[in-house]
């Protein structure tokens, strides 16, 4: 089990790390478009709704919640389920959950959570097309006004021993989110690049933004999958070591019992021989 888990972990980690550069460069392009004021914030994905027109307004928040389909991966599922279950909501906020993974779906259905969609069986090597229905659910619901905000909750892969529970806003795509990313880029001394857009910045932006949202959802799934496989490999490694220790302990006990039996038989034979000699 440990060897199988190690093989799957390596492939999942490679996929997550390979997808990051594309997501980062696409984010830079979006950020450049918004910051340069070449496009107005009139895109439908920028629209803010809920809770802003009065205290009676209810803000509906959809959480795209990533867990595993299976167990045997340590505290991977329980930690993130506990995070979302205990997450505090404001009085004027409603929580809706789209579960990507069977474990999260089973828990929130059992607890009576508002599960609006279920996605499972995406496999150990999820494809980009497999996440298209997830993104469509989020974007269509947002544009129709079914929810006012869409958030991602997943395990971000750091390394084999560490995964970070991450929550971030997917929609609406606000200027504040862009500026926060700009500030982070400045801290890293990122070099600004001036782009020339054809046919127009707005046309490019309207075409790229949906693709960007799809990429973010797909990358979140890859991060979650890499974290899951890493957690499972660590759990299987621990189980293998524990099984080895248990086997050694039981072998020692068996040897002791066998030796005790042999000693008893020898004493009986010796005792019988002495009795016959007398």
Image (cartoon, grey):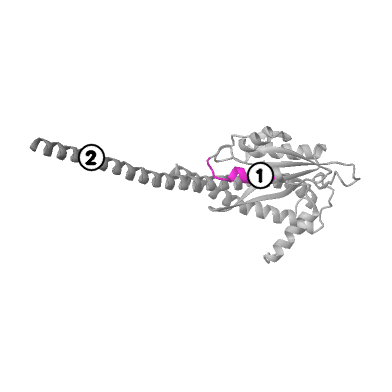
Q: What residue do we see at 82% from left, 53% from top?
A: 39
- As drawn, the residue found furthest toward the front would be 278
Q: Which mark is residue 82?
A: 1
2 vs 1, front mark: 2
Segment tinted magenta in the rendering: 72-84
178 versus 191 height, above or below = above
Query: Was residue 76 drawn as part of the magenta stretch in this picture?
Result: yes
Residue 220 is at least partly visible in this image: yes
Q: Residues within 10 Å of mark 2 (few under 14, many from 20)?
A: few
The residue singled out by tag 2 in the image is: 264
| Left or right of 66 in this view: 247 | left
Q: What residue do we see at 79% from left, 45% from top?
A: 45
Q: Which structural element holds mark 1?
A: helix
Give the tally of numbered discs.
2
Q: Which of pointers 2 and 1 lies earlier in the amino acid sequence? A: 1
Quarter-of-image position of residue 144: top right
Residue 195 is at least partly visible in this image: no
| Left or right of 84 in this view: 60 | right
């Amino acid at each position: 089990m440990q060897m199988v888990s190690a093989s799957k972990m390596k492939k999942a980690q490679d996929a997550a790390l390979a997808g990051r550069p594309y997501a980062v460069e696409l984010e830079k392009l979006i950020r450049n478009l918004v910051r340069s004021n070449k496009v107005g914030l009139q895109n439908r994905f920028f629209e803010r709704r809920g809770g802003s027109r009065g205290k009676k307004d209810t803000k509906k928040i959809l959480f795209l919640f990533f867990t595993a389909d299976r167990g045997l991966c340590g505290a991977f599922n329980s930690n993130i389920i506990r995070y979302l279950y205990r997450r505090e909501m404001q009085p004027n906020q409603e929580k809706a959950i789209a579960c990507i993974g069977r474990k999260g779906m089973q828990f929130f259905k059992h607890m009576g959570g508002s599960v609006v969609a279920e996605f499972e069986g995406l496999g150990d090597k999820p494809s980009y097309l497999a996440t298209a229905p997830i993104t469509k659910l989020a974007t269509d619901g947002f544009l129709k006004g079914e929810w006012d905000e869409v958030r991602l909750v997943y395990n971000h892969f750091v390394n084999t021993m560490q995964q970070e529970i991450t929550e971030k806003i997917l929609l609406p795509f606000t200027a504040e989110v862009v500026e926060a990313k700009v500030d982070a880029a400045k801290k890293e001394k990122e070099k600004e690049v001036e782009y020339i857009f054809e046919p127009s910045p707005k046309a490019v932006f309207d075409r790229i933004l949906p693709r960007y949202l799809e990429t973010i959802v797909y990358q979140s799934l890859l991060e979650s999958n890499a974290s899951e496989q890493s957690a499972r490999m660590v759990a299987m490694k621990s189980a293998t070591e524990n099984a080895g220790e248990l086997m050694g302990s039981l072998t020692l006990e068996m040897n002791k019992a066998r030796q005790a039996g042999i000693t008893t038989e020898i004493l009986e034979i010796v005792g019988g021989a002495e009795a016959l000699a007398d």
